[in-house]
């Protein structure tokens, strides 16, 4: 059976894949700085005979790699950016690996490599003449800044894909069915007039403007739909208190279950900023939209397909050592903490007492998932995704516990399970034209109500916010 051969070939590549995932984990790079990770991945794909482009328009760390010809064209998305200050060793207690260093607390060191495991296995099946079509790997930078895929979509890199597949680390094995939150990330820049603080009457403070904007925004919260939320951070202006600040910025992220809600509420936040500028005699120089994704549109036929493959595989092949590691982490949680973490990843209550999710959850969920991503390609192409367990029950993303696990056996074994799930899905899409038609018919139907517009400007370039 060809599908079994595909899964066997992932097992054959498992050492190489684990080594690559660990290598990227040991060399964590934040959004837009993923030079090492992108190079490692592009080189591996090149050596395997893929036609590789490293460096896409405006995204030097973006990758597009292709093998095969003709249709169907299936793209698998990968990511590889890390998080600031989340350095952690691969041990089940808090131990910083590099003081002040970055860490893979969202498991993106596994996402790209897991996708590569799948595309390599499909490539080998095409090579053997057992499959026909084109397989692509998309290395998508800067997911944590919510922008890589937006730029790749704007610049046409996904064009002529029939289907896009993706996975994300989690504590659960469950296809992605429900939308996540739409988000807009924007920096508000105020310009004032500098002065020596004792003669502040001749100055105009941009810092005051930022503070008043934030106060106004907090009053706004009561008068917007309850499920619209926002958070902000004041960006350092590098000016001591003895000088009136002529420059200051506030970085906002606003989230809502739907893009249309943000379209209504975000302009009111801009009005608040304008009011703050007026109150302080400063100028609101710029409202720069950095990025931000729409709520994801999950193709349910693809979710069914990924779930079917996960069930055929039975779950991640965790080792005894993985279970021991997981228990050492979950022992540090109170029962309430563990339950809260389990709920976020939609683990059913009957599994709350597990340390590691080795089961596949099929419960369809219409709950909106409490996170955001740069998922806009899902508005333009049929998009299927799944979560696979790479850390214990109760662990949240962006934590030291997640970082510890994504550099250890738990992460690697969850990643191989994801590789096989994605490759199994590709195999079926490439061999079953009725299935592909069903995926596309569903997409056509869903698309009728969607009117996609890219949330970044035609000339926008990816930017990383400097926090200090
Ligand atoms: Zn993340
Ligand atoms: Zn992530």
Image: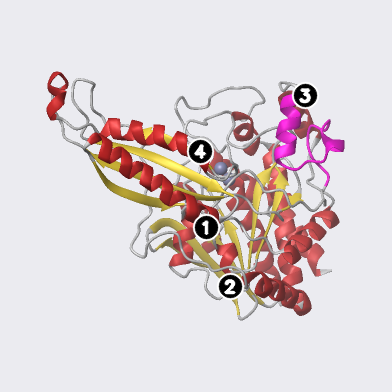
Q: Quadrant of the C terminus?
A: top left
2 and 3 marks in contact (CB < 8 Å)? no
Quarter occupied by residue 327:
top right
1 and 2 marks in contact (CB < 8 Å)? no
Where residue 266 appears, x then y in whole percent? 45, 50
Would you name the residue on which mark 1 appears?
A: 139
Task: Report the Cα–Cα distance between label 2 and label 4.
Answer: 41 Å
**Outermost residue, right side:** 350
Would you name the residue on which mark 2 appears?
A: 161
Task: Report the Cα–Cα distance between label 3 and label 4.
Answer: 32 Å
First in residue order: circle 1 vs circle 2: 1
Q: Is residue 36 visible?
A: yes
Task: Report the Cα–Cα distance between label 1 and label 2.
Answer: 15 Å
Where residue 53 appears, x then y in whole percent? 46, 65
Determine if the magenta segment contains residue 145: no
2 and 4 marks in contact (CB < 8 Å)? no
Would you name the residue on which mark 4 appears?
A: 221
Q: Secondary structure at mark 3?
A: helix
First in residue order: circle 1 vs circle 3: 1
Q: Secondary structure at mark 1?
A: strand
Task: Report the Cα–Cα distance between label 1 and label 3.
Answer: 38 Å
């Amino acid at each position: 059976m060809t599908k079994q051969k595909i899964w066997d070939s992932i097992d054959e590549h498992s050492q190489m894949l684990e080594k690559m995932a660990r290598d990227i984990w040991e060399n964590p790079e934040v959004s837009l700085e993923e030079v090492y990770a992108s190079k490692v991945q592009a080189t591996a794909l090149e050596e395997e005979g893929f036609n590789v482009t490293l460096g896409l328009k405006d995204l030097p760390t973006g990758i597009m790699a292709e093998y095969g010809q003709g249709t169907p064209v299936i793209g698998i998305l990968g990511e590889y950016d890390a998080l600031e200050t989340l350095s952690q060793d691969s041990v089940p207690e808090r131990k910083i690996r590099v003081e002040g260093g970055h860490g893979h607390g969202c498991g993106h060191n596994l996402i790209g490599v897991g996708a590569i495991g799948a595309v390599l296995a499909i490539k080998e099946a095409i090579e053997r003449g057992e499959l026909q079509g084109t397989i692509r790997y998309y290395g998508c930078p800067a997911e944590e800044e919510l922008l890589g895929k937006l730029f790749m979509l704007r610049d046409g890199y996904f064009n002529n894909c029939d289907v896009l597949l993706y996975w994300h680390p989690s504590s659960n094995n469950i296809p992605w069915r429900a939308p996540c939150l739409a988000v807009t990330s924007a920096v508000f820049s105020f310009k004032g007039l500098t002065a020596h603080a004792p003669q502040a009457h001749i100055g105009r403070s941009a810092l005051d403007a930022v503070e008043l904007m934030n106060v106004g925004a907090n009053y706004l919260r009561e008068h917007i739909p309850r499920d619209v939320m926002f958070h902000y951070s004041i960006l350092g202006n590098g000016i001591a208190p003895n000088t009136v600040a002529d420059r200051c910025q506030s970085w906002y992220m606003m989230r809502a279950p739907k893009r249309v809600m943000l379209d209504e509420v975000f302009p009111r936040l801009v009005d608040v900023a304008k009011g703050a500028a007026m109150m302080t005699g400063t100028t609101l120089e710029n409202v720069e939209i950095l990025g931000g994704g729409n709520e994801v549109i999950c193709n349910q036929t693809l979710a069914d397909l990924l779930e079917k493959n996960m069930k055929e595989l039975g779950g991640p092949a965790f080792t005894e050592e993985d279970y021991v590691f997981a228990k050492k982490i979950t022992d540090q949680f109170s029962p309430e903490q563990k339950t809260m973490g389990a709920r976020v990843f939609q683990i059913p209550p009957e599994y709350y007492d597990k340390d590691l999710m080795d089961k596949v959850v099929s419960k369809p969920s219409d709950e909106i998932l409490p996170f955001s991503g740069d998922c806009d390609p899902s508005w333009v192409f049929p998009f299927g995704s799944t979560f696979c367990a790479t850390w214990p029950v109760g662990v949240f993303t962006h934590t030291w516990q997640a970082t510890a696990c994504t550099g250890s056996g738990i992460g690697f074994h969850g990643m191989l399970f994801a590789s096989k799930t994605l490759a199994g899905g590709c195999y079926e899409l490439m061999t079953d034209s009725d299935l592909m038609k069903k995926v596309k018919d569903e997409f056509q139907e869903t698309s009728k109500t969607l009117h996609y517009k890219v949330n970044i400007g035609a000339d926008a370039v990816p930017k990383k916010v400097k926090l200090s």
